Amino acid sequence: MAKHAVLSSGAKMWRSVACAKSELRLDLTLACGQSFRWKETAVGHWTGVMGGRVWTLTQTDDTLWYYIYKIQDTQKEEGDKKKRTDGCLQKGNKVKNAFKADLKKEEEEPLAVTSVQNSEEEEKMLRDYFQLNVNLGDLYRDVGATDCHFKRIADIFSGVRMLRQDPTECLFSIICTSNNHISRIQGMVERLCQALGMPLCQLDQTSYHDFPTLSALAESSVEARLRDLGFGYRARFLQQSAKQILDTHGPQWLDSLREVPYLEARDALRTLPGVGAKVADCVCLMSLNKSEAVPIDTHVWQIAKRDYKYAAGSGQKSITDRLYRDIGDFFRKQWGPYAGWVQSVLFCADLKKFQSVKERSHVKQAKEEDVEERIATCKKAKMKREYNGTVKNLKTEPACHKKAKVSVKREKVV
DNA sequence: TGCTCACCTTT
DNA sequence: AAGGTGAGC
């Protein structure tokens, strides 16, 4: 039986992309609750499905390593799988056959040529998925220059990066997050893929499946099926949202939201059942290129109050629509057009599972400049943004917690 | 606008 | 209680 790849064993052909750990920390980025599809299958080795392929990723100081598994031929088992995968089968087979064609082609052509071609495409997929064109070092430096609290956290939690996920996978995973916690969501998403997604390959005892297609999710039998799998009231949201998308917009609709402005995409998503303000912002930020979307949950509200002395609405019991909008606008003013990325760093730093990261850095922290000095540095710093290749000069008065001058189109007040 | 409640399941 | 949504007042 095929096994999960391990870099140090030297048994497999790994490929690499130059990437410093300060630009990407796999452990934080893949386990902070934006994707639920990656598991640590060996120390520092993360295995998951991305772009219809099964990958194992690991990293050394300046290198991101990746290994891609061959898609297994499950032709013979299809009869058995038919019952289990019903809805997705039709489309799934087409995709699988396409994969098989690829594999066959690869065998026939000179190895070196296809290997280079594939590795170019695969490296591109990886760069796209991790959005490596966004310079995280610059973002951390610039935001840290105007926000001392962020700077303190960012020195410890470097390399926390937003993924650019497939919109369908992102939407339907995030719908599962309401009233829920990461470990349970992980199990649910795994069961969802096993039940409705196309099988890709099996490694050790684990079988990997692609994320279900919209048409698989839209089947009327899906709600009952997912209730059995422990999705609770979310089962109906998933099936109904898939059906609504296909019935009223078409299969390309979610992807097309990548091309429209943030507020438009967010409002479009909110018409779907199970999609409120928070889920819509998550999908915008994590799959639709909307770096200014800041998902606000009770946790982020605590951060606003505790670390940013955000007082408005503190008398309130829960996050009202009004408060949701105000906190988001507050953070966009504070952090600029990549506010969603900044929020994810602070969010990550607050997760219980990552508290050990802070402890490990204490020794290092003690040796560094003291707090007074850090604040002084903070005040002197200048602001210059260049994350996306486009230079945005945002000259702000250097001051701690000074708000960045950034215009994010304000929501219309109806 | 803002509040409450039900909705599933697990810690 | 929890990393939320939707419906009703």
Image (spheres, coloured by chain):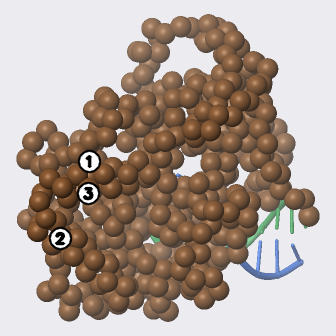
Chain colours: A brown, B green, C blue
Left or right, A319 with respect to A47, comes to right
Q: Residue at x 27, y 67 (%)?
A: A208
Mark nearest the camera among 3 and 1 is 3
Left or right, A238 with respect to A94, comes to right
What numbered label is drawn on residue A66? Answer: 1
Q: Residue at x 79, y 33 (%)?
A: A405
Above or below for A384 versus A371: below
**Residue at the disc numbered 3:** A118
Viewer-side residue, A338 vs A203: A338
Q: Are marks 3 and 1 on the same chain?
A: yes
Give the x, y percent position of residue A233: 56, 77
Q: CA distance from mark 3 to mark 1?
A: 13 Å
The chain under label 3 reads: A
Q: Amino acid at mark 2?
A: Lys
Q: Residues within 10 Å of mark 2 (few under 14, many from 20)?
A: few
**Residue at the disc numbered 2:** A105
Q: Are marks 2 and 1 on the same chain?
A: yes
Mark nearest the camera among 2 and 1 is 2
Q: Residues within 10 Å of mark 1 (few under 14, many from 20)?
A: many
Viewer-side residue, A107 vs B5: A107
Give the x, y percent position of residue A267: 73, 67
| Label 3: element kind | helix
Q: Amino acid at mark 3?
A: Asn
| Label 2: element kind | helix
Q: CA distance from mark 3 to mark 2?
A: 12 Å
